[in-house]
Image (spheres, rainbow, N blue to C red):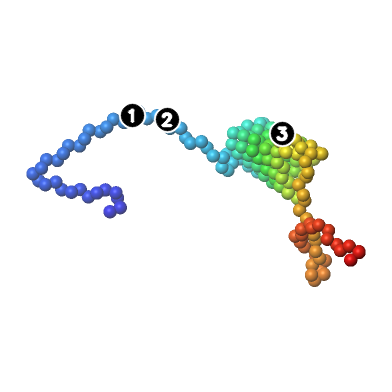
Amino acid sequence: MFGGRKPSTPQPSGMPTPPNPPPTPTPPSTAVTPPARQAVGFETVLGANTAFKGEIKSRANVRIDGQFEGDVQVDGSLLVGETARVHGNVQAKSEVRVAGAVRGDVSAYKVHLSRTGRIWGDITTNFLVTEEGAFIEGKINMINHPALAQGFNGTALPSPEASVSAPDSDGGGRNEAVEAELMEDERPSRED
């Protein structure tokens, strides 16, 4: 029933059984190319209890949680974990996410510095994200940003979002952010 075979039907006794057809020749096997690999997770991990001195070059994502001394070049993304201490220049084509410490220059399409992240060195990036508590000692170079073409006296800056603090209703001293709109001044004139 579930085996996928059909039950054999008995042939009438007077009829000969047809011969099995000869097997068809199979073409010689060719090497199958594996599908292009998708960057998921980390292909290379330097564990928290590991110290390594040298150079890392990788075409995939790398995670460092231990002590590393040397330069790092990654075609994917690099994660410098909270327990990591990297002493060397870091370069990634995609993203560098720093939750530990880096003493050296950092270059990537996007640099994300978490609240525990520390960088002593220059940062070159298209996009920079820093969380409250992060530390940077060095120069930040934003590349390929529209503001570079506009210049300081270029087009108008985007208007800031307005927010107003309103005291709490019980007068307890806490303030809450309140959404507000900027409106034209419509004060009545003194002549009215």
Query: Which residue does the numbered mark 2 point to in the structure image?
Result: 31
> In the shown orientation, is residue 191 left or right of residue 107?
right
Q: Which residue extends farthest left?
A: 14
Q: CA distance from mark 3 to mark 1?
A: 52 Å
> Circles 2 and 3: CB distance less than 8 Å?
no
Query: Which residue does the numbered mark 3 point to in the structure image?
Result: 89
Say if 103 sits above or below 182 in the image.
above
Occupied quadrant, residue 95: top right
Label 1: few (<14), some (14–19) or many (≥20) C-alpha neighbours in 10 Å? few
> In the shown orientation, is residue 164 left or right of residue 75?
right
Label 2: few (<14), some (14–19) or many (≥20) C-alpha neighbours in 10 Å? few
Please state which amino acid type lies under the numbered disc 2.
Ala
At numbered mark 2, what does the secondary structure look like: helix, strand or loop?
loop
Identify which residue, 152 or 188, lies in the foreground.
188
Residue 10, image x, y percentages = 15, 48
Please state which amino acid type lies under the numbered disc 1.
Pro
Residue 86, image x, y percentages = 71, 38
Please state which amino acid type lies under the numbered disc 3.
Asn
Query: Which residue does the numbered mark 1 point to in the structure image?
Result: 27
N-term mark: 2 or 3: 2
Q: How many marks can you see?
A: 3
- At 83% from the left and 61% from the top, the residue drawn is 186
Placement of the N terminus among the 4 image quadrants: bottom left
Q: CA distance from mark 2 to mark 1?
A: 12 Å
- At 46% from the left and 32% from the top, the residue drawn is 33
Q: Is residue 68 visible?
A: no
At numbered mark 1, what does the secondary structure look like: helix, strand or loop?
loop
